[in-house]
Image: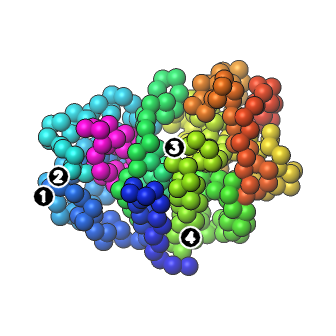
């Protein structure tokens, strides 16, 4: 194992590094990435109380502005996006003003969307503070906000200039949020790398203990897989769609149950199991997937829910093509495929198996 890792996302002139390790908030040279004299740190009230001063003290640029938002998925709205834009206008930001997104996936998504849309594009740095954001949302350039009718319906592909993942911040992450990141890590093994899935089966106890070496390996391998897929298909016209394994179900679960009532990673865990039920994957592999999710402390069933309403939400999903629902399914562990013609009764059958006993 190694105590530091650098992964590169290869996108020609928009390539960027993902740096993973300890003490990066204190030691990483952010200043060399900040193009002009100004930068804006966007964070939330929880993260600001712990890590904002540390980051400010490490940046040696002339003018550092901060914007502290409320915590939670309910922040990811057009109103909050407008608040960030107003702040940029007030500070007379121009195209060499750098935005630093210090927080979890919500902060990264909304700050990235502001960076993508203000003056048609500002440089921004992702500094993810949750495990889920470190292995998923901070990498690949998806930015956006939620709409009343669905998650992430407004957004853009816009790459950061760097991702800096300090694993030390995970020590203050509540258990429930931490375990949400494990769901995305499990996803990478399930869709792309069966050897990694086997490693997870053998090392999940170390990850639950937040062992540094295990974390750096798991985060690095997850980012390597995502970087490889994104480098092949940045705009999700083909292969990148496999990263959505479990997510179409998950987004419907979040929308139906309520953002924040069920966390994204929890919904992804259940969504992966729902997708596996209508996959070609063998029964022994289905059992391995459910056992790993259970051993990670993630939920594997839902309380009572309205199956018809869930189906309606899924039919609003961004991944609809020619009015047909597309789902990522598994041939076997480590081998995903896209099914373009999912029938509604298959979805309803998957729902039926996941009521809380």
Which label sits on residue 217? 4
> Disc 2 and disc 3: Cα gap in Å?
30 Å
> Disc 2 and disc 4: Cα gap in Å?
35 Å
Sequence-wise first label, 4 or 3 = 4
**Residues at discs 2 and 3 in contact (Cβ within 8 Å):** no
Question: Is 355 or 282 nearer to us in this picture?
Answer: 282
> Disc 4 and disc 3: Cα gap in Å?
27 Å
Sequence-wise first label, 4 or 1 = 1
Residue 277 magenta: no
Sequence-wise first label, 2 or 4 = 2
Residue at the disc numbered 2: 38
Residue at the disc numbered 1: 62
Give me the residue at 83% from left, 46% from top: 280
Query: Which picture quadrant has residue 296?
Result: bottom right
Classify 10 Å Cα crowding around label 1: few (below 14), some (14-19), many (20 and above): few
Helix, strand or loop under label 3: loop
Residue at the disc numbered 3: 235
**Residues at discs 1 and 2 in contact (Cβ within 8 Å):** yes
The number of callouts visible is: 4
Helix, strand or loop under label 1: loop
> Disc 1 and disc 3: Cα gap in Å?
35 Å
Classify 10 Å Cα crowding around label 3: few (below 14), some (14-19), many (20 and above): some
> Disc 1 and disc 2: Cα gap in Å?
7 Å
């Amino acid at each position: 194992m190694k105590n530091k890792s650098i992964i590169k996302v290869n996108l020609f002139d928009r390539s960027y590094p993902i740096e993973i390790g300890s003490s990066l908030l204190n030691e990483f040279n952010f200043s060399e990435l900040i193009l002009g004299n100004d930068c804006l740190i966007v964070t939330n009230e929880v993260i600001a109380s712990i890590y904002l001063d540390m980051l400010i003290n490490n940046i040696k640029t002339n003018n550092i502005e901060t914007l502290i938002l409320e915590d939670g998925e309910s922040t990811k709205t057009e109103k909050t996006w407008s608040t960030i834009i107003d702040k940029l206008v007030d500070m007379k930001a121009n195209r060499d003003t750098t935005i630093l997104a210090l927080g979890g996936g919500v902060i990264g998504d909304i700050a990235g969307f502001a960076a993508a849309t203000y003056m048609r594009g500002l440089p921004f740095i992702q500094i993810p503070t949750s495990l889920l954001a470190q292995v998923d949302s901070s990498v690949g350039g998806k930015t956006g906000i939620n709409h009343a009718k669905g998650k992430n319906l407004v957004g853009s592909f816009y790459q950061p200039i760097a991702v800096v993942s300090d694993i030390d911040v995970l020590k203050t992450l509540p258990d429930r949020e931490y375990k949400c990141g494990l769901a995305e890590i499990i996803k990478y093994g399930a869709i792309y790398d069966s050897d990694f899935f086997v490693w997870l089966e053998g090392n999940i106890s170390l990850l639950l203990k937040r062992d540094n070496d295990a974390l750096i390996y798991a985060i690095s391998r997850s980012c390597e897989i995502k970087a490889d897929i994104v480098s092949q298909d940045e705009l999700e016209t083909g292969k990148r769609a496999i990263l959505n394994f479990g997510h179409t179900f998950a987004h419907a679960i979040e929308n139906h149950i309520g953002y924040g009532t069920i966390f994204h990673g929890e919904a992804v865990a259940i969504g992966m199991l729902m997708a596996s039920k209508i996959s070609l994957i063998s029964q022994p592999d289905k059992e391995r997937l459910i056992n790993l999710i259970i051993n990670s402390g993630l939920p594997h069933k839902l309380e009572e829910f309205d199956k018809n309403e869930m189906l309606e939400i899924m039919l609003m999903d961004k991944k609809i093509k020619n009015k047909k629902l597309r789902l990522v399914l598994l041939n076997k562990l480590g081998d995903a495929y896209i099914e373009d013609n999912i029938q509604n009764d298959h979805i309803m059958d998957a729902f039926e198996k996941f009521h809380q006993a």
